[in-house]
Image: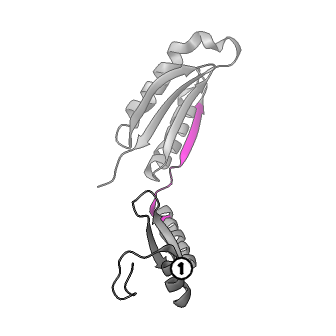
Amino acid sequence: MGDNIENPGVYSVREALKIAEELQLDLVEISPTADPPVCKVIDYSKFLYEQKKKQKEIKSKASKVIIKEIRFGPNTDEHDFNFKKNHAIKFLDEGAKLKVYVFFKGRSILFKEQGEILLLRLAQELEDQGKVEQLPKLEGKRMIMFISPKKKK
């Protein structure tokens, strides 16, 4: 069926294998569902190496998301609040996401409103550094809020 390697065309499997063997390369099936199936004569180990190299390059360019956690109690006083707020500002400036939560121990779950007010106050004070990704939500004994850093121009 086929002519020669300079004139690519339709070859039988035997001819294609013979050509690949002569060139000391591999016969790789590209599209098995096509009629007739499409094959290519290539150096398969080199092909795999190139694929790995591309995947590694894509992975290295992808940004890794760092999530930092800050924990409050429902009755956190002013000094502790400011101290943790400063840490939050530092984390957001570094480009990390924040997971801020109020942890309720024992009967302190009665102060849900105080916990929510605390988180919303923090979000308001961090308005310049980040934006709220998820508003305060109660999950078990924790009220959680996510803040992501604002993009720098």
The residue positioned 43% from the left and 30% from the top of the image is 134
Q: Residues within 10 Å of mark 1 (few under 14, many from 20)?
A: some
Residue in the foreground of this view, choosing between 142 and 45: 45
The residue positioned 35% from the left and 89% from the top of the image is 6
Q: Is residue 110 magenta?
A: no
Q: Mark yes or no: residue 42 visible.
A: no
Report the residue marked by disc 1. 17
In-image side of 6 versus 73 (left or right):
left
Tell me where the magenta segment starts and ends, as one range.
60-71
Q: Is residue 36 above or below residue 80?
A: below
Q: Position of residue 33 (x, y in %)?
A: 44, 56
Outermost residue to the left: 153
Q: Position of residue 41 (x, y in %)?
A: 47, 79
Count of labels in the image: 1
In-image side of 43 versus 132 (left or right):
right
Q: Amino acid at mark 1?
A: Leu
Residue in the foreground of this view, choosing between 104 and 2: 2
Q: Mark yes or no: residue 102 visible.
A: yes
The residue positioned 37% from the left and 85% from the top of the image is 3
Q: Quadrant of residue 36?
A: bottom left
Colour scheme employed for the rendering of this structure: one colour
Q: Quadrant of the N terminus?
A: bottom left
